[in-house]
Image (cartoon, helix red, strand yellow):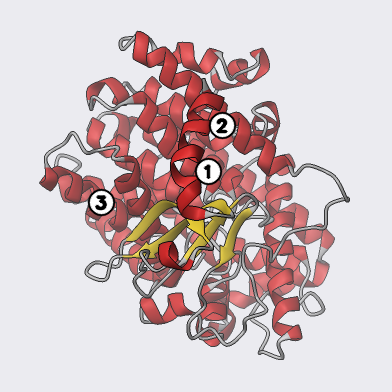
Amino acid sequence: MFNSVKQLLLSHFLPLMGNCSRRGAISYDSSDQTALYIRMLAVTNKTIKSSFVFTPGDVRVRSQVGFEPERRGSHPYLGVDFRTLHSRAESAGSIPARRIRRLFSFQRHLLSSRLLRGAPHLNPLHILDEDYCGQAKCMLEKVGSWNFDIFLFDRLTNGNSLVFLTFHLLSQYGLIELFQLDMVKVRRFLVLVQEDYHNQNPYHNAVHAADVTQAMHCYLREPKLAQSLTSFDILLGLLAAATHDLDHPGVNQPFLIKTNHYLAALYRNTSVLENHHWRSAVGLLRETELFSHLPAEDSLSIERQLGSLILATDISRQNEYLSRFRTHLDENDLNLGNASHRHFVLQMALKCADICNPCRPWELSKQWSEKVTEEFFHQGDIEKKLKLEISPLCDSEANTIASVQIGFMTYVVEPLFAEWARFSDTRLSQTMLGHLGLNKASWSTMEPEASGSSEDGESDPARSSEEPSSRALTQGSPES
């Protein structure tokens, strides 16, 4: 069936195109700067090529191996291709695992389409049965456990952890049925989201997004939230977690600004990455028409509130959100019956989920620490190569994994999770704080000097201000 459709398309377009390859692109709507994803056939024929006009902005070409630079505008460092920034050389003749995963994802999309076309009321879990091996399904039975091993789950799902986990949670909460979502559109949206993460990035990739989504699920089940949040709140929380770092380039905001990157110019050096993650997510929502059956004003409301959640992960605004949260707790005036207060708590939950790695069990936390530091140090190497000032925490000669993690835990993670424990004083909160203390102690034994300086550093305003801004480089979608 697929081959016949393919032949039909080729016979229709081939006379017009000549030699061509399947491509797509992303551009920005000039009115609201929303990322618009466009699937098209990029051709070499000049008469056909001239009919495609893209607006200035963030434009990239989707090829078989990822995104290729289509336009770099004012970017002076043309040698920096963010799609291959963290990639490793593959052996000659080997088939990239990413390409294999794409093929599987497309085949599953076709299977889902055929099944649903003949059985519109099919339980969505039947579709998952086609994809999951028994071990992965067993893991999903404990998806609410704080010890959930996202790395193992990603391996069991052949690198599709974000798609499977998010689809499972949407089904588990009954959101697909409640909001009358087309399951094929949901699946397509999640596949595109996963594909738009740079899995060459050691840290900011689809596995991180899946980990944040799983953590968000744990927080949504906390008594105070479970008793107060609406289904709409839960839908927003899960979507924001899954897309919060969409198309992250593997470098931080200061890097984009000092290299005069076009994204920095587009968003005027303000929450550059967060704005890009949000607009890219909106682009995929519109492309897949996931909410096209809803009234236009409802769809726009979802897009705006999704943006509000993702923008809250900007680490440079950490103190702003933390001070507001602390004030609410001191005055005991958080009213979860109020929609704006519930939304604020969702913002704080996403911020916690985004940087919760130090609060995981040591076996998981250590892996994340190594990955995020690898990404930091790689940026530092690029900065050295380009003769730029090396960003804080990115100099592998001046920092270690232990020193980076101790500083991050001290100045960013501990203050946030201490306040979250005041808000939600549960077993989970105490477990997270317990892991945080043990993990910090473990890193301290590896870095004796860092241990002393981290405790004395509380009174050092220069050090204090440096840590959060540098964190923008990683953990979550803050400046990441």
Label 2 secondary element: helix
> Dots 2 and 3: beta carbons under 8 Å?
no
Q: Amino acid at mark 1?
A: Gln
The kind of residue tagged 2 is Ser
The reply to whether callout 2 and callout 1 are in contact (CB within 8 Å) is yes
Look at the picture and state if 353 lies above or below 27: above
Q: Secondary structure at mark 3?
A: helix
Is tag 1's residue or tag 3's residue first in the polypeptide sequence? 1
Q: Position of residue 22 (x, y in %)?
A: 54, 49
Tell me, yes or no, whether the two marked residues, 1 and 3, touch with CB atoms within 8 Å: no
- Give the percent coordinates (x, y) of residue 3: 56, 26
- The residues bearing labels 1 and 3 have C-alpha atoms spaced at a distance of 19 Å
Kindly identify which numbered label has been placed on residue 313: none
Disc 1 marks which residue? 194
How far apart marks 2 and 3 lie (CA) works out to 26 Å
Q: Residue at left 44%, top 65%?
A: 49
Camera-nearest label, 2 or 1: 2
Q: Nearer the viewer, residue 366 or 261?
A: 261
What residue is rendered at 34% in x and 63% in y?
A: 321
Is residue 148 in view from this perspective? no
Q: Which residue is mark 3?
A: 303
**Which residue was labeled with disc 2?**
105
Which is nearer the N-term, disc 2 or disc 3? 2
Q: Relative to residue 74, is residue 102 depicted above or below? A: above
